[in-house]
Image: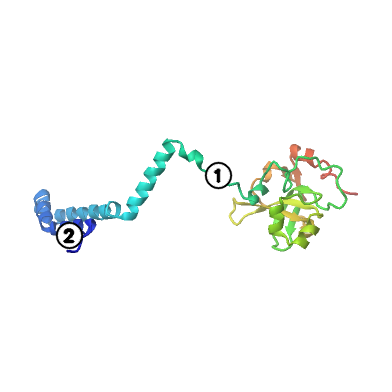
Amino acid sequence: MPQVPVAVALQLALILSAVPAQYLISQWTGTNAAQRYHATTRLMRIWKDWRKSYLNATAWMDWADQQMSDVMSMVGMQQEVKMDSPPVETMLFDNDKGFFGASTTVRSPRPPFVFLRVGEVVRERKGNMVGVVVSWDPEMRAPSEWINKIYSSFEGNAAERTPHYKVLFGGPAGSSLMVAYLPQTQLERITGMRPDIPTLENYFTHFDGERFIMQPWLRELFPEDEVMDT
């Protein structure tokens, strides 16, 4: 004899009980047709919710997983889960290793081959994006895995000896921010443009019409960047 799944058996039982259910509805809600219609609709909605929540294997598995997760948290087993290290790209925003222009070493004296200055507005040559320089290194300072990902072996050797700049760009959305660490050969200075980029106020006090003026803490790191060449 074939086995009937429990869920199917329950559905058959509910179908067979449809006539008694209609009778009960008519008794509970009176003889008004509109009242009986609304009561029947409500009963069908309750049945659909039951079928989705209690007769659905996926819903039961999700519930069981949640209960197991709660139990593991209660006994402290979540402490055994090891967090992965953040991707290298997140270090572009900030890090304590001095990578991507984050070094707290004072950039003085300023090498003559570093052409751009903190606070200057620049255009990225390939994507034609406009940003603002917030830091620079006389030579590239980045993790080896990032260098290998961005450059070929030949390009990497040349890029490591090239001044690099940390540049802030506005993202696609008005409040979004993009950070890049770019070689000097990929940037050009532009004037007469004041880009609207989030977080610039953390680095600069104002825009003087040509460039952004550094906050005191940033000026201490780049003391010669506001002294223009004569």
Q: What residue type is labelled 1?
A: Met
Image quadrant where residue 48 sits: bottom left
Q: Nearer the viewer, residue 73 or 94?
A: 73
Q: Dot 1 surroundings within 10 Å: few (below 14), some, or many (20 or more)?
A: few
Label 2: few (<14), some or many (≥20) within 10 Å? few
What secondary structure is found at the residue carrying circle 2? helix
> N-terminal of the two: label 2 or label 1?
2
User: How many marks overall?
Assistant: 2
Name the residue rendered at 19%, 58% in the picture.
9
Q: Nearer the viewer, mark 2 or mark 1?
A: 1
Q: Where is residue 46 in the image (x, y as percent from the top left)?
A: 23, 52
Secondary structure under tag 1 reads loop
Name the residue at 50% across, 38% down: 79
In-front residue for pair 65/37: 65
Residue 12: mark in rendering:
2
The picture places residue 193, in percent across and down from the top left corner, at: 73, 55
The CA span between labels 2 and 1 is: 49 Å
**Residue 190 image offset from top left, x and y in percent:** 77, 57
Residue shown at 42% from the left, 36% from the top: 74
Quick one: 81 or 135, which is closer to the camera? 81
**Labelled pair 2, 1 in contact (Cβ < 8 Å):** no
- Is 202 on the left or on the right of 49, as rendered? right
- Residue 165 is labelled as none
Query: What kind of residue is marked 2?
Result: Leu
Residue positioned most to the right: 230
User: What residue is at 66 percent from the left and 47 percent from the top?
Assistant: 91
Q: Can residue 11 be seen in this view?
A: yes
- Is residue 105 shown left or right of residue 33? right
In this view of the protein, can residue 32 be seen by the observer? no
Which residue lies under the disc numbered 1?
A: 83
In the image, taking residue 38 as reference, residue 110 lies left or right, namely right
